[in-house]
């Protein structure tokens, strides 16, 4: 074996070795790398019960209710299989709207309501001018955006 | 081994020094034209987004910067592997010259993303898999540069940093696929997606032009930096004195 061939194998071994080690480590950490849990995962009991965690999904169309005279907002978050009611008091980000993705951090109460301390909007990968969006979904974006 | 002569010839410093000087403007001019056209197309011609309004225009700097952060790292890692296997000093020089440029593009991607995240997501920063792995990329660049400058002997500095660059390449697929492997706040890919396009043509072309423009800009800067790197490494060589005297 020439020295060059030996070095080639050494470099390949480094990449494969580090790759394998990283894969195993990431597999082990998989749960901690999830930024949020979906409503189905929560219903299946995968979310940590007592600790606060993040819930992610789409805001159900027609579910947003604001209580007059306070900052409280109630809405439900869905992944089309399960739905979780959320209550939140505070300012909502620009992109928060019905049918769009959100990630809320908070705790799940015993009655099944998720009380959020923070609500972030999750943007999807679609970019289009307003006219195109209008022609795609009429009336306003139906949850799912299957169009 | 006749097929490899061009490769070995390219690795000879005098030859490469001249070629890099000749190539530089061929990268620089198209880059300037593309970037100016893309800025006009992205900031003036493209319509506002249906959800994000005018704020979406950040994508014209953010996505190309993020692309460059990964492209430059791949360049560095490949150059480092070549340098380790074929003991090619010029390839070490490529990695060394590329690193600071890549670090700045990574910083730009993180900074623009943060500026966009505040109004759109409602936060400057989250520790999701995409953002965290991109931050690790910045640390890999900084670690590479710190390692080089902390070792006195140039040959040992070259080899140690090259091993680091090769090891770090594992982060690239993690960055790219993080949005699919895990739930992240960051959205999935828009343009590398197979199937129906997620962006309309009038918004897409400035983005692609900007990515190509940034890539060519990197080519131009790499040529300039490589010439400087060659001068530094060959400062006592006779050919250099002749070259500079011309």
Image (spheres, coloured by chain):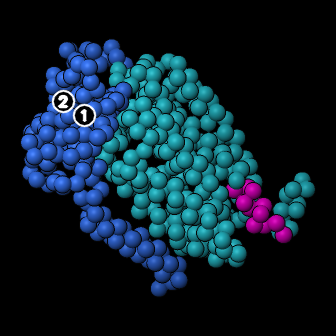
Chain colours: A blue, B cyan
Look at 19% across and 29% down and name the residue there: A74
**From the viewer's perspective, is B88 left or right of A113?**
right
Q: Which residues are magenta?
A: B226-236
- The chain identifier of the residue carrying mark 1 reads A
Task: Identify the image quadrant of the N terminus of chain B.
Answer: bottom right
Q: Position of residue B217 (x, y in %)?
A: 62, 42
Look at 61% across and 63% down and name the residue there: B145
Query: Is B195 situated above or below A97?
Result: below
- The chain identifier of the residue carrying mark 2 reads A
Element type where label 1 sits in the image: strand
User: Comparing marks 2 and 1, which lies closer to the viewer?
Assistant: 1
Residue at the far right: name it.
Answer: B245
- Which of the two discs, 2 and 1, labels the residue nearer the N terminus? 2
**From the viewer's perspective, is B188 left or right of B135?**
left
**From the viewer's perspective, is B242 left or right of B28?**
right
| Viewer-side residue, A2 vs B230 | B230
Measured in 3D between alpha carbons, the distance from the residue under mark 2 to the one under mark 1, in whole angstroms, is 9 Å
Element type where label 2 sits in the image: strand
Instruction: Check contact, mark 2 vs mark 1: CB within 8 A.
Output: yes
Q: Which residue was labeled with disc 1?
A: A88
Magenta stretch: helix, strand or loop mostly? helix
Q: Which residue was labeled with disc 2?
A: A75
Look at 52% across and 23% down and name the residue there: B43
Q: Is residue B147 magenta?
A: no
Query: Is A74 situated above or below A44?
Result: above
Q: Position of residue A93 (x, y in %)?
A: 35, 30
């Amino acid at each position: 074996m020439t020295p060059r061939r030996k070095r080639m194998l050494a470099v390949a071994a480094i990449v494969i070795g580090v790759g394998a080690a990283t894969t195993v480590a990431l597999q082990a950490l998989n749960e901690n790398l999830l930024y949020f849990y979906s409503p189905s995962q929560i219903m299946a009991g995968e979310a940590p019960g007592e600790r606060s965690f993040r819930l992610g999904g789409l805001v159900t169309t027609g579910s947003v209710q604001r209580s007059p005279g306070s900052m409280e907002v109630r809405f439900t978050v869905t992944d089309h299989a399960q739905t979780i009611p959320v209550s939140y008091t505070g300012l909502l980000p620009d992109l928060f709207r019905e049918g769009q993705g959100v990630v809320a951090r908070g705790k799940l109460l015993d009655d099944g309501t998720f009380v959020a301390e923070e609500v972030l909007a999750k943007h999807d990968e679609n970019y289009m001018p307003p006219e195109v969006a209008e022609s795609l979904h009429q009336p306003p974006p139906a949850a799912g955006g299957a169009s | 081994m006749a097929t490899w002569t061009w490769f070995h010839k390219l690795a000879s410093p005098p030859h490469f020094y001249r070629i890099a000087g000749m190539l530089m403007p061929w990268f620089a001019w198209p880059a300037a034209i593309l970037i100016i056209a893309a800025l006009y197309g992205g900031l003036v011609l493209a319509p506002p987004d249906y959800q994000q309004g005018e704020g979406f225009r950040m994508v014209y700097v953010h996505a190309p910067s993020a692309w460059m952060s990964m492209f430059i790292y791949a360049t560095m890692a490949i150059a480092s592997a070549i340098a380790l296997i074929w003991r090619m000093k010029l390839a070490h020089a490529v990695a060394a010259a590329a690193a600071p440029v890549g670090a700045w593009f990574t910083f730009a991607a993180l900074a623009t993303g943060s500026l966009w995240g505040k109004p759109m997501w409602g936060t400057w920063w989250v520790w999701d898999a995409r953002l965290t792995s991109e931050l690790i990329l910045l640390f890999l660049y900084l670690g590479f540069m710190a390692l080089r400058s902390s070792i006195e002997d140039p040959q040992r500095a070259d080899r140690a940093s090259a091993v680091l660059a090769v090891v770090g390449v594992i982060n690239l697929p993690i960055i790219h696929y993080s949005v699919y492997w895990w739930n992240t706040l960051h959205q999935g890919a828009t343009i590398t997606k197979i199937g129906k396009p997620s962006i309309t043509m009038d918004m897409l072309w400035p983005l692609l032009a900007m990515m190509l423009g940034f890539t060519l800009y990197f080519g131009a800067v790499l040529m300039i930096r490589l010439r400087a790197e060659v001068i530094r490494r060959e400062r006592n060589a006779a050919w250099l004195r002749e070259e500079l005297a011309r």
